[in-house]
Image: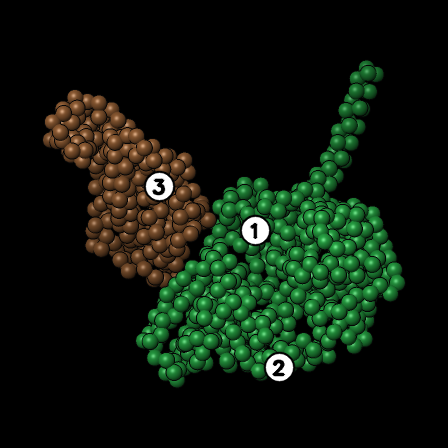
Chain colours: A green, B brown
Amino acid sequence: MNKFYTTLLAATMSATALGMVFPAVAIAESVLRIDEVAVGELDPAKASDYADSILMFNVYDTLILPQQGGPGQVPHLAKSWSSDGNSYTFELRDDVKFQSGNPMTAEDVVFSLDRMKALGQGLSFLFADVQSAEALGPNTVRFNLAQPYAPFVASLLRLPIVDKQTVMANLGDGEGEMKDWGQVYLSANGAGTGAYMVNAHNPQDETVMVKNGDYFIGVPDVAPHTVRLRYGLEAATVRALIASGEHDISSQWLPPEVLRALADDGAQLLTEAGTGAFYVKMNTTKAPFDDVHCRLAVTNAFDYGAAVKMIAVTDEISQGSPSTGAVPVGMFGANPADQILVRDMEAAKAHLSACAYAPEDINIELSWIAEVPLEERFALLMQANFAELGISSEIRKLPWALFTEQVSTPENTPDISQLFVNAVTGDPDTLLFGQYNSANAGTWQSPEYLKDDEVDRLLAEGRTAPTEAGRQEAYAALNARLMAIAPTIYGFDRQSVFAASNRVKVPALSDPDKAFGLDGMGFSFRLMEMTE
Amino acid sequence: MRRTLAILVGNPLSLLGLFLVGIVIFSAVFADFIAPFPEHRGAVVDFANFNQPPAWPNIFGTDLVGRDLFSRILYAYRISLVLGVVVLSIATPIGVIVGLVAGYVGGKTEYVLMRITDVFLSIPPLVLAMAIMGVLEPTLTNGMLAVTSMWWPWYARLVYNLTRSEKEEGYVLAAEVIGASRAYIIFREILPNCVPAIITKMTLDFGFVIIIASSLSFLGLGVQPPTPDLGSMVAGGASYLPDSWWLTLFPALAILIAVFGFNLIGDALREILGADQ
């Protein structure tokens, strides 16, 4: 009898213990499964596209973070900052440790900037005007700029802080004192302070990350314990995996039809409000688009309504919102959200009659980027739209590599190119300067070859104006000017849409008050909540 | 000949083959009359009606810009058939002549010709075609060139082996004794005895040529849009499975019908002609 009770007691206790342990284990071992296009570049100084940004924002930290739910920045690795003309001084937190255990100091910040500038890849152009960074003390760092650059603080969102000691201990082969700047090591290993540590990394296949238990501001228990980021999954594969509960968040590159099918099956749709837009760019150096009236004719003939309809996912959610002009809604200088662009065939015909070229003599080369199938549909839409004006056109599919080569000379640049352009720091300067400054003509984002003194002047004013009101005014004037001379058809303001299982909650991608307004930052895993 | 036809029609499988091939040829030839929307083979958009499942009048549904899939498949057959005919009518004569000459003449000629053939045979066919298409611009003509270049060696190999055994036969020796020229012996004596095997292989190959051409356009190396093409339709639709199934299913079935039909006839011919010999 005694033995029976002992056994019963033991059984009850172990059951209770199991009951207590199981949920804890389930949360501790929660796995988040997501995907992106290949390749995943782990070296933070080379990060440029979306997959790279996801890795960078989780493995590394930056001095500041975007304010959630509004414009501006808040301290992160830095406690505070001040500016004095062309220099900016940051006070760093003294309680931050790298994943290696080394403390984070001003030396690491200086090293990170030097490394970024020395490699000159990724988004290093943001720091072209930064002459130097110097450590004024263990926790004080000063950046010296060559000339005023208002978006400087925002550009620090793209300066991940790297562990100097770890990198110096792992230099690969190369010339000079710094050898390869640790490129070989950092392309396969993480050396940041971030909330997630790299466990395994294959840039063509998969990156596995696990929670950093010593993160300086802690990682909530509900955040995923392990994250598997897979590269290059087919749309149909992602569709099947999410439906069967074997995948959690899709990439944003799924066609609208597939996102809609997933939503119909009960998946949630996450959105990241755009800091970019879809631009249809005209080559302003060649007939017929060297004539402003011909450009205005096609911008008025473009069917903006059909474009927005084409990218709609559900009645409420779309991969974009109607365009109001050259600057996306929400940025400095944007027009109000209700002043949307609409098709106006009367205006189009009036401009066409004022154009120096007769419609029957015009034959436009409409290009689309082979890697973005959605653009073929836009090419076919424009072909039909322009045909209503009596303008004929030919559609040409261009692989991305060939396109970037062709735009380097105005003669080879197609009459019409279709591009998605983003502000990499959320600031309009990083969206517009590269596209419309005459000195930058002929890059992948500037196939217009626009040469306009007024535009150049306003772009310079926007990046140097000392006050926010001044910048606002400069970008509003720039927007009006870009509408008047129409080098581009401003197709729609872009929004990224992701399909997700119901195992995860992502406030930064579903609650506008928690949104970061910076591409990729919504994928901060530490702010996600696993529900099972 | 009449007996061959009688057997073809008498066998249910080969009858099915004839029927399927008949559908394909009929669709391709009369596409202009059958297609409900002949203009949809070109650059047409109808965004009011895109990505619709099969329903009247779009019995195979519409594609992602609202074009009628049924009409586009009919026109795609036309391109597949032209491609098959052109490729085989160039590859077969080249391969046959190389095989006959190498097999009958022998010696150094045989050595050189057959080693060149071996080089082509040693490269995987799709890889060879991809390499050619990668260098040239992806157009229909270059697609035919690429497929042709990988097809002739198989005929050379087949005819070479046949010639080697035929040249020891009594009728060849007899022709040599009475002083017939080499050309006469090769083309008037040996070739007619190889014809049944060549025709059988051509029928079987027709389906494979269509598959290879579709594979090339599946990889983006074939016919360029908006020209309809079965392989690119399957490739383009695959991203939208399983929801928009009609984008992939109907073009894939169209490939199946053509390849299956030609193979059934080829199999039947092989049996009949093999028995004749």
Dot in front, 1 or 2 = 2
Choose mark 1 or mark 3, whichever is in front.
Answer: 3
Task: Give a yes or no on whether discs 1 and 3 share a subunit.
Answer: no
The one of A499 and A172 positioned closer to us in this rendering:
A172
Circle number at residue B101? none
Q: Write down the residue under mark 3.
A: B150
The secondary structure type at the circle numbered 1 is loop
Residue at image position (75%, 31%) is A18
Q: Quadrant of residue A295?
A: bottom left
State whether residue A79 appears in this view: no
Under tag 3, what secondary structure? helix
For the residues bearing labels 2 and 3, Cβ distance under 8 angstroms: no
- Amino acid type, residue under disc 3 in the picture: Met
- Label 2 sits on residue: A457
List the residue tagged with mark 1.
A37
Q: Kindly indicate whether the residues beneath marks 2 and 3 are on one polypeptide chain.
A: no
